[in-house]
Image (cartoon, rainbow, N blue to C red):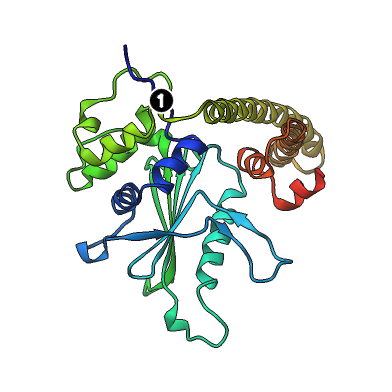
Amino acid sequence: MYTKYLDPKADLTFKKVFGEHEDLVISFLNSMLPFESEDEKIKSVEYLNPELVPLNPLRKDSIVDVRCRDSLGRQFIVEMQMMWTSEYKQRVLFNASKAYVSQLECGKDYDLLHPVYSLNMVNDVYSDSEDYYHDYRIVEIAGTNEVIEGLRFIFIELPKFRPKNYGDKKMQVLWLRYLTEINGNTRAVPEELTNNPVINKAVVQLEVSAFSEAQLLGYDRFWDMVSTARMQISSSRKEGLRRGRKEGRKEGLEEGRKEGRKEGRKEGRKEGMNEERIKNARGMKAEGIADEIIARVTGLTPEEMAALQ
């Protein structure tokens, strides 16, 4: 008899592992964030409300997977994104900026602001780079390379990760193996993971026996939605290419075949994908799926979600 596990990348499991166990999220953040010294490492955290409520009720509300603050006042936002959308970076910037500005009350000094780190695990490929790790900062481009501190964004493309002996990044490798190697088909967890006490504790959180029937139904439903969305996005891309070729030929007659195909393909792909995303969202909404999950899976903007009402 073997132990059955759930995939740690699912909404249910990711929030349980990193949103309910301080020691696990501390280890995860310390291994993933680009801290340069031991003094920078996180020693303790307190969980914060993942719902970023605006001071002005007319402004946009947003929810992240995990949000916490350490003893130095630094805030950390951790998210798992199943599929890449062109709007995701803007959402990440919006949420981190909101967490940053919400620290300061009227009349307080700016030097009271503490840095906000946004760690984004992406279960998709979005860049042409061969690297899976991407570190974004606000940097002066010409001359000094001076950095404006306050916001830092880390994006990790999970499909690009390949286990290697990174030496000083051992825990990063173990955590990434945890996220990429364990799923519903796992029959035996690699010893390299279970031999580490921290990772082993995270593995135990994934055992099917730890979840209720209702939670397991929600888990299955989540993956059904992801699978459906991926198929429809793939179909949208194919349709977009077809429309792009057609529009490209039309444009080519007027402005040149090469440029026309390029622009037509781009516009056709965008139009086709957006139509399918909206169609998919309407179907999910009809099934009673929460708006938060629909937006996460389809990548629709708040305005597009509101239009579905």
Q: Residue at x 55, y 37 (%)?
A: 83
x, y (%) of residue 218? 57, 30
x, y (%) of residue 119? 43, 52
x, y (%) of residue 199? 27, 38
Q: Quadrant of residue 85?
A: top right
**Neighbours of disc 1 within 10 Å: few (<14), some (14-19), many (20+):** some
* Residue under pointer 1: 209
Q: Quadrant of the C terminus?
A: top right
x, y (%) of residue 192? 21, 30
Q: Identify which amino acid the numbered label 1 is placed on.
A: Ser
Front-most of 121 and 20?
20
Instruction: Spot the residue most to the front.
Output: 212
Q: Quadrant of the N terminus?
A: top left
Describe residue 225's horizontal placement relative to residue 303 as left or right: left
Q: Residue at x 50, y 48 (%)?
A: 65
Q: Residue at x 19, y 32 (%)?
A: 195
